[in-house]
Amino acid sequence: MRIKIVIIALFVMIGCNQSEATVPTVSQSKVTAITTAIEKVSPGVVSIYRNQEIAQINRWTGRLKSLKPIQSSGSGFIISKDGYILTNAHNIVTEFSDPSLSITNIKIDVVLPGGNHYAASIVGVDSRSDVALLKIEGKDFEHCEFGDSDTAIVGEWVVALGNPKSLFAAANYQPIASAGIISAINADFGIDSGSGRLMNDMIQTDASLNSGNSGGPLVDANGRVLGINTFVRNDSENLGFAIPINYAKKIGEELKLKGFVDRRFSFGVNATPYRYGVNGEIGLYINSIDYDNSGDNKALYKGDIIIGVEGYQIQSYEQLQLVLANRDTRPGDTIKLRIQRENEIKIVNLVLGKE
């Protein structure tokens, strides 16, 4: 019996010693892929504060009356060492449905981790994609690294960083982080009827997003940006959406080059609604074609009936324009048309020209 008691005591002592020995290991385990990703990307995440002066035009006198300025906060992230910043367009400019309201002045204050303030200039704003490009003066800024949003998969860990509820300043000027997974990809919501914002191919995440997170980065476990956090579903919990970075990067490059995104294109064809077939379906009958158009429409002929574009059935020119707007097409893009030619269905390519 005494021997059993001695053996049990030895096991207890060994177990206690092993528990003490594992304490440093538990402490070290606090460093994970998520914490490493946050540490890597945080220096490039910024807080954005906007002051936008508003004036109302008197429709009788034409005079401007100053109204109370709009102040708001959001997020962004530095993408180059010379101070270019990506964010959401709605963080920079408010669109008004009332034509009597106009913007007279916009001031953008950017706060970096650590608390340094910079006045930012607006390089370009594209409301359709909800992407804006800013610039702060300086050099050797720490900046975020782009990932590849085309390789994003459902279930992978992601982190959202930014300035939700203006808590950036309250947290010693460090970005606020929330973690989750990608819960869906290629989420399509079409074009928002109120703002005209295109909301297709979005990355859906359950990482917590709040007011002020807009414009901040959604990063993968390697600390690379996969998207720009943009909006949440108000009728749900933990359903946030981000613009894929591959698309946002393309918009940013256009804004840097031109200051705006040129979506003006032409088909070089004149077409009108037309009933065809035994069931009286409606398509677009091509009346004439300008083969000198800057695009390539040589695969089309007068008398062709356009019945579909990019896999969608169309019955009017307005529907065709809507499909192309949903795809955010530009001059030089190739689109697939489904046409009827002499009772035969064909698929032809059309390269859009400049308007």
Image: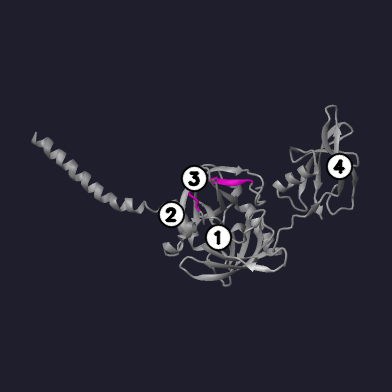
N-terminal-most mark, 1 or 4: 1
Instruction: Please tell me whether residue 205 belongs to the stretch shown in magenta.
Output: yes
**What whole-number distance in Å separates the C-alpha atoms at marks 2 and 3?**
21 Å
**On the image, numbered disc 4 is attached to which residue?**
272
N-terminal of the pair, mark 4 or mark 2, is: 2
Of marks 2 and 3, which one's residue comes earlier in the chain? 2
Disc 3 from disc 4: Cα separation: 46 Å
Where, quadrant-wise, is the C terminus in this rendering? bottom right
* SS class, disc 4: strand
Quarter of the image containing the N terminus? top left
> Residue, x 76% and y 50% (percent of image)?
333
The disc labelled 1 sits on which kind of residue?
A: Gly
Q: Is residue 75 above or below residue 220?
A: below
Amino acid type of the residue tagged 3 in the rendering: Asn
Q: Residue 344 appears in which quarter of the rendering? A: top right
Q: Residue furthest front?
A: 60
Crowding near the residue tagged with mark 3, few <14, some 14–19, many ≥20 C-alpha atoms within 10 Å: some
Q: Position of residue 354 (x, y in %)?
A: 81, 55
Mark found first going from the N terminus, 1 or 2: 2
Residue type at the position of mark 2: Thr
* Residue 187, quarter of the rendered image: top right
Between 25 and 178, the one nearer to me in the picture = 178
Rendered image: mark on residue 35:
2
The alpha-carbon separation of the residues under discs 1 and 4 comes to 45 Å
In the image, the segment drawn in magenta is 200-210
The disc at residue 238 is 3
Judge from the rendering whether residue 90 lies leftward or rightward of residue 266; answer left or right: left
Numbered disc 2: secondary structure:
helix
Q: Where in the figure is residue 234, as x and y percent of width and height? A: 53, 46
Which label was assigned to residue 223? none
Question: In the drawing, what numbered circle is on residue 76?
Answer: 1
Q: Residue 54, relative to residue 245: is it above or below?
A: below
